[in-house]
């Protein structure tokens, strides 16, 4: 396995949208910088403090 920088992010927070916007960002200005992407949970949070780690409903994805 080759060492490379991995991007760990909330999709909506980095791209300002969803997966298509993140893909456009990674294929554009950030092209070639990351060896992989780990998308963090994107459930509706209870209070907003922990983003996707304290969801109000595990069955609803925004």
Image (spheres, grey):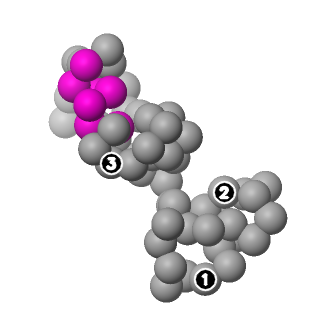
* Residue 59 belongs to the span the image colors magenta: no
Q: Quadrant of the N terminus?
A: top left
* Residue 26 belongs to the span the image colors magenta: yes
**Start-end of magenta stretch:** 22-28
Q: Where is mark 1, residue-wise?
A: 57
Q: How far apart are marks 2 and 1 (CA)?
A: 13 Å
SS category of the residue bearing label 2: helix
Q: Residue 49 versus residue 6: which sits nearer the camera? A: 49
Q: Distance between the residues labelled 3 and 2?
A: 17 Å
Give the mark nearest the N terminus, 2 or 1: 2
SS category of the residue bearing label 3: helix
Is residue 4 among what the camera can see?
A: no
Quadrant for residue 22, please give it: top left
Q: Position of residue 46 (x, y in %)?
A: 75, 71
Q: Where is mark 2, residue-wise?
A: 51
Q: In this view, does 27 lie to the left or right of 16?
A: left
Q: How many marks?
A: 3
Residue furthest top in the image: 29
**Mark sitting on residue 11:** none
Quadrant for residue 43, please give it: bottom right
Q: Position of residue 47 (x, y in %)?
A: 80, 64
Identify the residue at image location x=50%, y=79%: 60
Q: Tell me if residue 19 comes above or below residue 55 in the rendering.
A: above
Q: Where is residue 61 in the image (x, y as percent from the top left)?
A: 47, 72
Q: Residue 1 versus residue 48: which sits nearer the camera? A: 48
* Helix, strand or loop for the magenta stretch, by majority: helix
**Mark sitting on residue 19:** 3
């Amino acid at each position: 396995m080759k060492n490379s920088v991995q991007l760990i992010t909330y999709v909506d927070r980095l791209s300002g949208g969803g997966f298509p916007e993140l893909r456009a960002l990674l294929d554009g200005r950030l092209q070639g910088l990351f060896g992989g992407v780990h998308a963090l949970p994107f459930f509706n949070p209870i209070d907003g403090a922990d983003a996707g780690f304290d969801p109000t409903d595990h069955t609803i994805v925004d």
